[in-house]
Amino acid sequence: MRRLPLRLLRSAAVASVRRPVPSRVGCPVPPTTQPPAETAIAPANLARWLPRRGYSQFASGFTPLQPKTLGSILDIERAKGLSPEHLVAAWDDYHLGRGHIGTSMKAKLYHLLEQRSSTCRYFVIPLWRGSGYTTMFMQVQMPHIIFTGLEDYKARGTQASPYYTVTHYTEFAETKDTVLVRGDVVFTSKLTDSEAKCLLETAHSFYLNDVRYKLVERFNKETHDFEFKDVLQVLDMPTM
C-alpha cells in the first residue's frame, strides 16, 4: 500500500527529546501473584476527589498548553485527496519515534465518545508499572482528554498540572470517516511514551465498551456505589 510522503506532514516542535518507542506497544499484563503498588481506592472517599459540579476547566496549567492545530502538523489541502487508509498510515508513520502518540478512530466511535463524555467527564485508570500500579485521573473535554496523577489531583485539586493531553482532530470525520488522534506527554518524568499509548487505549475502551462504560457512569453518577476494585478486575489487575 502506498504511504503518504512524509513531506506532506509538517515538522512538529518537540518540547524535549524522548527515546523512540516501537509501534503498537501493548499494555503490560500484570502478574496475578503480585500485589498492587497502591491500595485500592475507598469508595467513601471518592466524592471528595471529584471536581465541583459545573467546573469546566481541568487545571489552570492546561490553558497555556494549547494543542497544535491539525494544519500545523499536516497539509490539509493535499491530504484531502488521499484515501482514509493512506492518511491513517502516514499519520501513524509520522508519529513513530517523535515522542508523541498517534492513532485514529472511526467517526462513529468518536461521536459515541463525545456523547458519553458529555455527561460522564471524569474517571480513574490504574496504570501498571513493574510489580504494581499507579492511578491516573482523567477528564474528557472533547475534543481533548487530559490526564494527571491521582495523588497530584488529591493534593492540588484543579491546580494540578496535566501529565498528558490528547487531541481528537475531526477535520476528516465526514469526508473520510476518520478522526485523527494525537497525544502529547507533558511531563516525561511522569509518563513514558509506551505508558501514554497504553493509557489512551485504556481510556478509550472504558468509554466505547458498553460493559466498561457502566463503571464510568457509576463513578460520575453513583459515586457512593463505585468500587475501584471493579476497575482492577476488568483490567485483570490484582486487588488487595
Image (cartoon, rainbow, N blue to C red):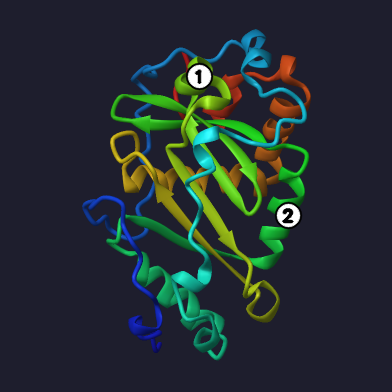
SS of the residue at dot 1? helix
- For disc 2, the neighbor class at 10 Å (few under 14, some 14 to 19, many from 20) is few
Q: For residue 236, say whether it is visible.
A: no
The correct choice, above or below, for 180 with respect to 81 in the image is above
Is 145 on the left-hand or right-hand side of 8?
Answer: right
Closer mark to the observer between disc 1 and disc 2 = 1
Q: Residue at x 57, y 28 (%)?
A: 231
The numbered disc on residue 131 is none
Q: Which residue is farthest front?
A: 64
Q: Which mark is residue 112?
A: 2
Give the quarter of the image for residue 111: bottom right
In the image, residue 100 sits, relative to residue 73, either above or below, namely above
The residue under the point 31% across, 42% down is 192
Quadrant position of the N terminus in the picture: bottom left
Q: CA distance from mark 1 to mark 2?
A: 31 Å
For the image, the number of numbered tags is: 2
Task: Work out whether 145 lies above or below 61.
Answer: below
Q: Position of residue 2 (x, y in %)?
A: 39, 89
Q: Do the residues under discs 1 and 2 have CB atoms within 8 angstroms?
A: no
Tell me if mark 1 has few (under 14), some (14-19) or many (20+) residues whose alpha carbon lies within 10 angstroms of its own. Answer: few
Q: Earlier in the sequence, mark 1 or mark 2?
A: 2
Considering depth in this image, is 225 or 99 the residue closer to the camera? 99
Residue 182 seen: yes
The amino acid pointed to by label 1 is Arg
| Residue at 30% over, 61% down | 98
Q: Which residue is mark 1?
A: 156
Q: Amino acid at mark 2?
A: Leu
Q: In terms of image quadrants, where is residue 37?
A: top left
Circle 2: element type: helix
194 left or right of 51? left
- Which residue is found at the position 78% from the left and 39% from the top? 119
Residue 41 rendering spot, x and y as whole percentages: 55, 15
